[in-house]
Every structure is written in structure tokens, then in C-alpha cells.
Image (cartoon, coloured by chain):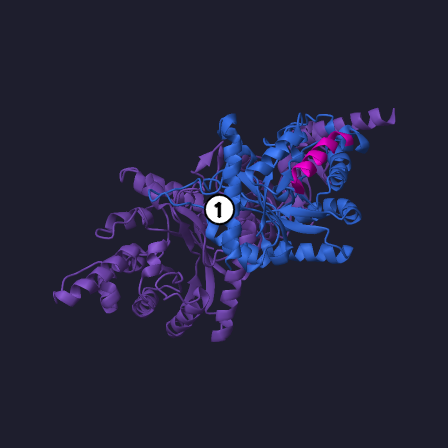
Chain colours: A blue, B purple
Amino acid sequence: MLKIGVQTQNAIHDEDPGRDFARLRRAGFDCADFSLHGYLVNKEIYRDELNSFFSQSVSELEAFFAPHKAGAKKAGVTIHQMHMPYPIYVPKGSRRLNDYLWNEVAPKSMRICAFMECKYIVVHGFKLARFLGSEDAEWVETERFLESIAPLAKEYGVTICIENLYDAIAGHLVEGPCCDVRKCAERIDRINDKYKAEVLGFCFDTGHANVIGLDSEAFITRLGHRLKVLHIHDNDGVRDLHQIPFTFTRTRENTSSTDWEGFIRGLQAIHFDGVLNFETGPSLNAFPVSLHEDVLRLIAKIGGHFAKRIAEA
Amino acid sequence: MEILCSTSGIVSSQFPGQGLKDIAQAGFSGIPLAPLGHAYTKDAVEDWYAWKRRQRKAKTKTWYRGWFMDHPKTLEDALRPFTERCNALGLKMPLAVGPDLGSPSGRDEEMEDLRAPVTRLVEECIRIAASSGCRSILVPPLVVGIGGEDIWSANRAYYLRLAECARQHGMTLLLGSQCKVISGHIMRGFCMDAAEAADYIDELNQAVGEERFGFCMNVGLCNLCGQNLFDFVQTIGARLKAVILSENDGCCAASLLPFTAAEQGQSRLDWLNLIRGLRSVRFDGTLIIDFGDTAASFSPILRPELLRLAKATAEYIRWQVEMEALLEKYPSRVLFGAGNMCRAYMKCYGEQYPPLFTCDNNSVRWGEEFCGLTVQSPDRLRDLPPETAVFICNVYYREIEEQLRGMGLSNPIEYFNDEYMPSFHFDRLEEQEERDAENRRTDTKRDS
């Protein structure tokens, strides 16, 4: 059976990570998706209001995360994947900002990933198509960034995962970077060939796929073995809400409006053997704190349901 | 590039006269022959099934909505009042929209095999379309009622059968996209993956040994599925023969007038990437403006005004798509304006279509070098060779055009516009200056 994981955002707190990892374990999770991006949040990056977290030395950062690593280990939770802060490049940002993101935040994130003994780190591709004219031109810049951290990935035995993202046109979410599966497959293979190592893989985000009406089954099937990690979450097909699967409907029949069956068929088709990871940290905000453990338990149970269904193939 | 106005929301099928007249008076020269589509709709198919069931019991002969599926030969007579009216008004019908079952839901999968009656009906539609002056017909795929067979295998056979009829009548068959609906949520369906659609078209054309198939892109459907419109158009490329221009908010399936599904002062449809794409493939096919829901929501009293706006909107989109062709049309050109728009011109087109110089009314700037061009006094325009076009690169188009006409210039005067450029500078000039200043401050700090 596939292992079940969950995002640490809202679930693991710096004050007592050991206690929180134990709670995740009790709820039924084997793995965690460490929310490194929570230490330098995107809204602040866009506003050029950087905090000093990543200005710390590598040894200081490792000391900071040592309790998290120990707590997870003690609880029996594997830190399977993590999320690098994003964006790593702000199109209209100052050179100072972008230099800091690229040369400080990114390499230190890689180092933290290795320190946490985490195998996968998810990064966001650059959103530059509006300026540069095409997704291809945009990818050239993303690839330049990936090339800057790929040697570290090889050295640390970490796989960088690009993720299907959206962009917004007056609030309407549309395809963003890494939504063309053919191109992604070619790019991943080419870069891995170059490094003779699996430095690049893919993170499939079910919520991002849903808001742009993507055919999950076709996408996953074509992606095949390049699919390394998952961001499983649900939404209304309009906004990126990061909620619990099966919670949205659009008709009075009240059946789920997200194509979970297609998602399952896709994972069955490629014999997915990774972790069923839920990026549902924000969903906890909707519930009273006293129910958080129950919510986590429900998410883990949904993971168990997916695992069972996938195993039926 | 020809522009057609969809009759949806404007022309009543029972009394088409007024709607068609409004379309003609707004300046449109053509419409798609769309009423063919009414012969086979979801309602018609359901009625047809019901009729079949009833027929087993009572042998009565009454009209029912699925009538044309059993009696395709009667379709031409039913359409005659419409086509005759179009001919009388001089409205051309170069493209037909074939029958479409619409977006299927789960229930439709239980339908029986529809291929035989639908094929007969669509063949008749091809014949009628050809005799009405159409050169192409949009034939949506069969995505339901194909007996559980692989969707492409079933459609491949269906399209190849239709190809023979299309060849006999000199018609091009256009494939189109289909959404699928999962509990009310619209998702990408058949032919919504542009690479796959392109492969299908190539396979069909190869099978028939000629270019009998092309593609009709429905911009509204692409928007509902958040597709990258630039990539979509680029991938379909020369196979793209027609584009249905229709707007929606990206959530609800509606046909709105372009630029009207706006939020935060901006349309929720990615016109930038659509126009970029169409411009990059030098699209020269058919544009069909479809704003059926907008039109239907307006009082018939206001509709003539709305149609005039729709005509101007479609012309504007055509002008944007043809921008590069317009630059290419003239052997030489000069610009008027030395600001952001001139800078955008030089970034994207300066190398391929180099201007002789630019000019500006601000005498302080005369003699200045800007983006590789010398800024001249407008008086220099009097010395231009007659075939040199003046491209106004300033949003005060009409005022500047009046100034130039007032100078007695006989050169062609054109508008240039940078709203939908192939690429953009990250900053406008004033922002760039600010950012440069900050970078200089950072450098100074670092050096000290």
C-alpha cells in the first residue's frame, strides 16, 4: 500500500515540532511535506519585505531545524518532500531581491533539504511568459535557475520537482508554467541525461490541475515515471483553495466535481509507488483547533482510500 | 481574414428577418450557416429516443425534435426561408456549423449507437452547406453514443466517411474541441489537447491524401479550461482555419461580447496570448464573433447598437492580429512618438521593420537618440517619399492624425499599438528609471 503524507503548514509548529509530528503519526500519516516556504512567504517576497530567516548561516539553519528533524524521526514520520520558498524570481523586483532569492534562499533550501534527509524539493517555475512572449522563453529562465541548483541536487541526492502551476488573468486562473506534459517530460529527461542523475522530477498538483480543467489521467499517464511527488488537494474549480478532497460539488446530485477517478486511473496506469501527499494545510484554518486532529485523521483516511483504490489495479 | 457574426442570440429561427437585417446593417458581410446545428442537439436526440420508444406502440406520424435524424432530406426545405433571406440581404455564409450534441454528462454514455443516423444527417448538412455557398463546415466529434469504443477510433472512421461526401462537394471539414462535464465542472475533453488535435488532423489528411481537414478553435471553450491560448494556436498552426471569438468569465459557459467579462479593469480572457498566437502564425482564416448571451440579454431595441459595437470589436481584433502584416505592407516607415510605445515597437519589430526615424511634438527631444532612432521634428515628415507610412505610436491617435492631415501629408497614416505585443519590457520607462536608480544605490552600498 502507498504511504500517506501531509503538508506541515498549520500542522507542525516551531515551538514543539516533536509533539506535532507525533500528532501527525497518530492521525495516520507516514510522511510529511515540509513547508519550508512558510519561513519566507510569497506575499512578502512580492512586496520586497524579506525577513532575515535565510540570512542565517547554514549551520544556524541546521540548528534551527534540528528539533524538527529529530521530532519527525522520533514520531516515525519521514520527511519525504519539501517546498522551496517561491517565487525565486520576481519579474519587476530589484536586483538585490532577486540576487538574494537566487543565491541565498535557493541553495540554502537545498542544503536544508539534505539536512532533513528529504529526497524531494518542489520548486516553482518562473512566471515570465507575459513579458518574454511564450512559455518556451519562460522555461529558458527557469532552466537557468534549475541549472544553478542541479549540481547541489546531484551532490545531496535530492530530486528537484517542478510543479504544474497556474497564472491569473483578472482573477481567472489559467495555465501557468509546467502545464504542458509533453514539454515537461522532454525537459526532465534532457536535464537528467545531462547530469546523469535524477536531479529533476515532477510534482503533480491536483488542485492546480482542477482549476484549469486539466485531464489528470492523461497528464499523469504521459508523465509516467517522472512523477515523483504529489500535492493532493481540492477546490471549486475556480480558486486554488487547498481543501480536503471530495468536499466540492457543483450540482444538486452533490457528487464531487473534481475528477478523482481520473487521478486514480492515472496513478494506477503508471504504477505510482511514491507517497500520497496532501497539500491541505490551509484547510485546517476552516476548522476549530479542537477539531484539527480529527481533520488530519480524515485526510489520512482519504489517503488510505486512494491507496486502496490504486492498489486495485 | 473574413469576419462573420454568429446569429446566436440575435436571429430567431422562426422569424429570422429582423435579426439578419440588423446583422447586415451593422456592416457584417457574412454569418456562419448555424441553423444546421439545430437539427441535432441534445434535446433533439432525447426526443428522438422518446419517439423511438413511443413508435413501437403507436404508429402516429407527428413532428418531433429529433425529426431530422429520421428525415434528413427535409432539412433543406426547413432552412430555405433562412438562406433565402440571407441571400436577399447579401449576407454570405462561407462556413457552416454542423450539429453538436454539446457537452456530455454521465447519463449520455448510456445512449445507443448514434453513428448511423448522425452520419446520414451530417452528410446532408455538408450537401446543404455546399449548396448555400459554404466552403467549410465545423463537425464536432461524436463523444457520446459511440458504444463504448475508443473515442478516436470511432471518430476517425466517422470523419473519414464524411470526408468522401465533403470531397464531392468541395468542402473542408473542421474539427472542434469538446469539453466534458464532471458533476457540473467543465474539464478538457476531446480535441482540447492541441497537440493531439493536430495529430488527428494530420492523420485524417494523410488518410484521404489531401488537405480536407482543418481546425476551428473555440476561444470560449479554451478559456473555460484555462488553456494557454498562445501555445494552443502555435501548436495547431496552419491547420487553424476558423476561430470563434467568444468571451466568458472562465467559470460559466456563456457567449459574451469580447472584453465584457471584466474584473479588476481587465477581461478574464487572455486576449494577449490569443492575439500573440494568431499574429505569430499569420492567421488568415475566418473569425466568427459569437456573443449570443450578451445579445439575448439586450433588448431588441438596443441590439442594432450592440451589433455595431460587435462589428467594431471584431475589426479591432482583426487589426491587432494583422499588425505585423500591416508593418510589412509598406516599403518604409517612420514612427510618431518617442515614448513607451515607440520603445515597444523597437523591441519587437525594430529589427525586422526598421523605421527611418521617429518624431515628437516636444522640441526639447529633437535630435535625441531614442532606442536607436533619432527623434525628429514632425516637419521632417514633409520630406518623406510618398510610399513611406507614418505609424502613430502614441495613444492620442486621433489628435495626432488630425495634426498630420492638417500638415497636408499625403503619406499613408497608420496606428501602431502595443497592447498585444509578442513580448514586453519588464517595466515601463518611468519604472525602469526607478529600478535602475535602486540598483545603482545597491551597487554603491556594496562597493563602499
Query: What span is colored magenta in the figure?
Result: A63-82
Of residues B1 and A265, the one nearer the viewer is: A265
Let me know if residue A74 is in the magenta part: yes
Q: Residue at x 58, y 59 (%)?
A: A270
Q: Residue at x 53, y 32 (%)?
A: A293
Tell me where residue B433 appears, x and y as whole percent: 71, 29
Tell me where residue B331 appears, x and y as whole percent: 63, 53
Number of callouts: 1
Q: Quadrant of the C terminus of chain B?
A: top right
Which residue is labeled 1 in the image?
B317
Of residues B164 and A75, the one nearer the viewer is: A75
Tell me where residue A116 appears, x and y as whole percent: 73, 39
Task: Give, as a three-letter code, the residue at label 1.
Answer: Ile
Location of residue B168 with respect to B7 vertically, above or below: below
Location of residue B362 with respect to B401 vertically, above or below: above
Of residues A14 and B139, the one nearer the viewer is: A14
Location of residue A162 with respect to B124 vertically, above or below: above
Q: Residue at x 70, y 51 (%)?
A: A200
Of residues A34 and B190, the one nearer the viewer is: A34
Tell me where residue A177 appears, x and y as whole percent: 61, 46
Apparent side of residue B254 relative to residue B345 in the rendered image (left or right): left
